[in-house]
Amino acid sequence: MKYNPEMAINRYKTLDQIREDAKGLHTAEMFPLQFRDWNPTTGATESRFWSIKNMNTKQEICPATGDYSLIQHIDAVNWVLDSIQEAGIDGHGVLRNWGNQFKLEVFFDNFQFRDPTGEEFFIGCSLASSYSKQVGLYINPYIIRGVCSNGQIFKGGIGNVNTIYARHTGNVIERVGASSIKEMVNSIASVQGTILTMIDKANNDVITFQKVEDEVLTISKFVGGTRRAKAIIEEYNIPLTTTRLELYNIFNEYGTWTDKLSFQVQDDILSKSEELLRKGLKIDIANDVSAIADALPLAI
């Protein structure tokens, strides 16, 4: 497999450096769109609908009802980092900024393990949130492959560690609670065996495509279309016979480090790679070769 030497583990920053980077995340505010009649309880008019506006771009993002809870990106980042450090854990991570959405991926310095081949893995967690209602507040278990710094988010949880998800209604941070973060952090160390079992099964699962068209069609399900599948096959020189683990690593590397992928496309590719690792792969047969001869438009 082709790995980029620039994808070293030192590409990640300390938690204190991430706090500084978080100061550059976009902020948002809510502005009233439609008013109700005067409220005798509060003595004021109330808005039924609100407009969420990105204060950096000055663009309206989307409408929201009055029960929508706007969480500033920087507040969410600091809340999770505080919970990690209060649990006595230090780490490194990367902060990805799409403006209306962001993603924080952190691995814990003292939670690492090696597979039977000696390859090193780091365990941590991932946080995502959005102003656009595209995603609520997600906190997922997370592992990083040390050789190339590819990251994998486990949206379905892993072992006895569950994903934390909250819609943007009410006091989200209070509802989730710092204790939930600490519980996830403290229990993540227990998932080593589960991860190693999945990796071992994927490494021993040999995948053989009968023709290139089958390979393109099958891979397109994981990366968002035949055009991207063809590009990835060429870039990584994927042979017709490979392993499920090799495909998983390729999809993960592409989703983790390819520049200019949108939040949704990156999230979809990493979610599909998780599905590949957990559930296996079914080869699709391209009966009509012309159906994939011309690539579909590539969403980025």
Image (cartoon, grey):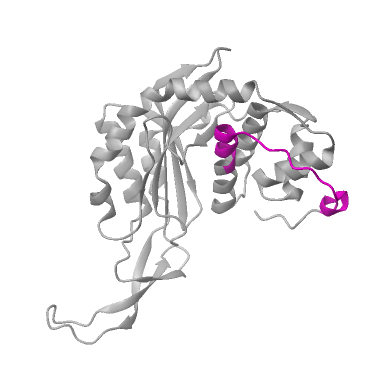
Quadrant location, the N terminus: top right
**Can you tell which quarter of the image residue 298 is in?**
bottom right
**Can you tell which quarter of the image residue 271 is in?**
top right
Which residue does the image show at 40% across and 47% down from the upper left? 138
Decide if residue 28 is on the left or right side of residue 249.
left
Over which residues does the magenta segment extend?
Answer: 272-294
Residue in front for this viewpoint, 153 or 282: 282
Q: Is residue 147 visible?
A: no
- Vertical placement of residue 19 versus 66, above or below: above
- Vertical placement of residue 72 versus 161, above or below: below
Magenta stretch holds residue 288: yes
The image shows residue 205 at horizontal and vertical percentages of 66, 24
Q: Which residue reaches farthest bottom?
A: 37
The image shows residue 224 at horizontal and vertical percentages of 67, 50
- Vertical placement of residue 114 versus 97, above or below: above
Residue in front for this viewpoint, 245 or 288: 288
Decide if residue 94 is on the left or right side of residue 220.
left
Number of marks drawn: 0
Q: Which residue reaches farthest right?
A: 290
Which residue does the image show at 55% across and 37% down from the upper left? 274
The image shows residue 161 at horizontal and vertical percentages of 37, 33
Q: Is residue 295 visible?
A: yes
The image shows residue 192 at horizontal and vertical percentages of 44, 21
Which residue does the image show at 67% across and 32% down from the upper left? 247
